[in-house]
C-alpha cells in the first residue's frame, strides 16, 4: 500500500491536508520501488482542500507491503521523527519493507519533525479508513 498525505494551499489561501491510498497488484520489490512514479490503483482519498491548482507545501509518501502490521509502521515513523535531520529535502528513507519519501518547503524546514508527525498521523488515519472499508466490503 502507498499512503500519501499532502499539505496544500488553494489559490484562495485555504490550507489543509489531502490524503490518498493506493494498492499495488501483486508484490513490489521495495529495493526497486520508485514511489514517485509507482503509485498503483487509487483505493481511497480524502480532501480537506478541493483538488485543482493547489500548491503542495509538504508531502509524505509511505509505502508498506499490504501485510505490514500498522503498529510497526507507527513505531518506525516515530523513530524517523526522533532521528537526525535529513541532509536534504525531499528525502527517501528505507528500512526493511518500508519506504518513506518526505518533502517540505523552506518555510516548514525549522519544524520538520512536527510536520512529519502531523502528515504521518493523517496518513495513518487514512490507512485505518482503508482497512475498515476492506473489512466491510
Image (cartoon, rainbow, N blue to C red):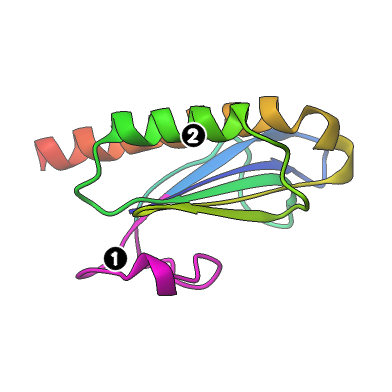
Q: Quadrant of the N terminus?
A: bottom left
Residue lying at 68% horizontally and 24% vertically, measured from the top left? 114
Q: How far across and how far down the image is residue 78, in percent?
A: 50, 27
Quarter assignment of residue 75: top left
Q: Which disc number belongs to residue 77?
A: 2
Quarter assignment of residue 50: top right
In the rendered image, the vertical position of residue 118 relative to residue 92, given as above or below: above
Residue lying at 62% horizontally and 32% vertically, measured from the top left? 83
Instruction: Please say whether residue 29 is one of the residues in the magenta stretch.
Output: yes
- Please indicate whether residue 93 sits to the left or right of residue 39 in the image: right
Secondary structure of residue under mark 1: loop
Nearer-N-terminus badge (2/1):
1
Q: How far across and how far down the image is residue 63, in percent?
A: 41, 53
Secondary structure of residue under mark 2: helix
The residue at which mark 1 appears reads as 24
Q: How far across and how far down the image is residue 137, in percent?
A: 10, 43
Which segment is the magenta one?
21-42
Quarter assignment of residue 115: top right
Q: How far across and how far down the image is residue 79, in percent?
A: 51, 30
Instruction: Please say whether residue 108 is one of the residues in the magenta stretch.
Output: no
Amino acid at each position: 500500500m502507498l499512503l500519501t498525505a499532502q499539505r496544500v494551499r488553494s489559490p484562495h489561501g485555504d490550507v489543509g491536508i489531502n490524503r490518498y491510498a493506493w494498492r499495488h497488484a501483486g508484490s513490489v520489490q521495495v529495493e526497486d520501488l520508485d514511489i514517485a512514479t509507482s503509485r498503483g490503483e487509487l483505493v481511497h482519498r480524502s480532501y480537506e482542500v478541493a483538488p485543482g491548482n493547489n500548491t503542495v507545501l509538504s508531502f509524505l509518501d509511505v509505502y508498506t507491503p499490504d501485510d505490514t502490521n500498522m503498529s510497526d509502521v507507527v513505531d518506525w515513523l516515530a523513530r524517523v521523527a526522533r532521528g537526525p535531520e535529513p541532509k536534504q529535502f525531499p528525502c527517501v528513507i528505507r528500512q526493511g519493507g518500508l519506504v518513506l519519501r518526505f518533502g517540505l518547503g523552506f518555510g516548514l524546514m525549522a519544524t520538520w519533525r512536527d510536520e512529519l508527525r502531523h502528515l504521518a498521523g493523517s496518513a495513518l488515519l487514512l490507512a485505518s479508513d482503508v482497512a475498515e472499508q476492506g473489512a466491510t466490503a
